[in-house]
Amino acid sequence: MIVLLAGGLLVLAIGVYFVRKGALQKFTADISVPSGSAGKVVLGLGIVGYVAKGIVLGVVAVLIVVAAITLDPSQSTGLDGALRSLVALPFGGLILSALGAGLIAYGLYCFVRAWRARL
């Protein structure tokens, strides 16, 4: 139980790190941001992508912590179960769609980062 709880809190800390990195635009240290409108698109993709990834990791962390507290390992289902649990919420489809768009933005940002990474 203690190990699972610690793991859940670690995943939550990583999720908070990603949200913070996106919101404060700390990811710009890893990439050479182009100027003009292309730079604005890259910044937008990075912000939305990092925040969405952090939120999804936070949802996964909550499920892990709930599984640790209730001593029910079936509650810890991973990313797919975390996303499925969002659908059960009011406006869950809308939330899931927004997070999906955010994860797509993160994927596009990763392509740009591979192309324009600071080495």
Image (cartoon, helix red, strand yellow):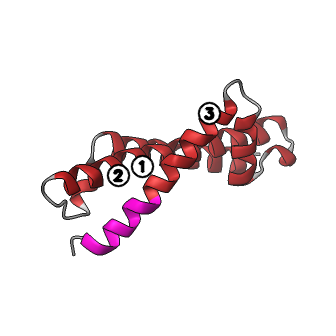
Q: Who's the residue at 73% across and 36% down the image?
A: 87
Q: Determine the image quadrant of residue 97.
A: top right
Q: CA distance from mark 1 to mark 2?
A: 6 Å
Q: Amino acid at mark 3?
A: Leu
Identify the residue shown where x is 28% and y is 41%.
Answer: 24
Question: What is the quadrant of residue 93 in the picture?
Answer: top right
* Mark closer to the chain start, 3 or 1: 1
- Frontmost residue, 74 versus 117: 117
Residue 27 lies, in percent from the top left, at 29, 54
Amino acid type at image mark 1: Tyr
Determine if the magenta segment contains residue 117: no
* Numbered disc 2: secondary structure: helix
Q: Depth-wise, is mark 3 or mark 1 nearer the camera?
A: 3
Q: Which residue is mark 1?
A: 50
Could you tell me which residue is drawn at 40 percent across and 65 percent down? 110
Q: Is residue 115 magenta?
A: yes
Can residue 10 be seen in the rendering of this structure? no
Residue 35 visible at all:
yes
Q: Start and end of the magenta stretch?
A: 107-116
Q: Using a 10 Å C-alpha cutoff, classify the residue at mark 2 as few (fewer than 14 neighbours), some (14 to 19) or many (20 or more).
A: many
97 or 67, which is in the foreground? 97
Please state if 3 lies on the left or on the right of 51 as rendered: right
Q: Which residue is mark 2?
A: 46
Q: SS at mark 1? A: helix
Helix, strand or loop for disc 3: helix
Within 10 Å of disc 3 (Cα), the crowding (few <14, some 14-19, many 20+) is few
Which residue is the site of mark 3?
94
For the residues labelled 1 and 2, say whether their Cβ atoms are less than 8 Å apart: yes
Which amino acid lies under the numbered mark 2 shown in the image of this protein?
A: Gly
Q: Are marks 2 and 3 in contact (CB under 8 Å)?
A: no
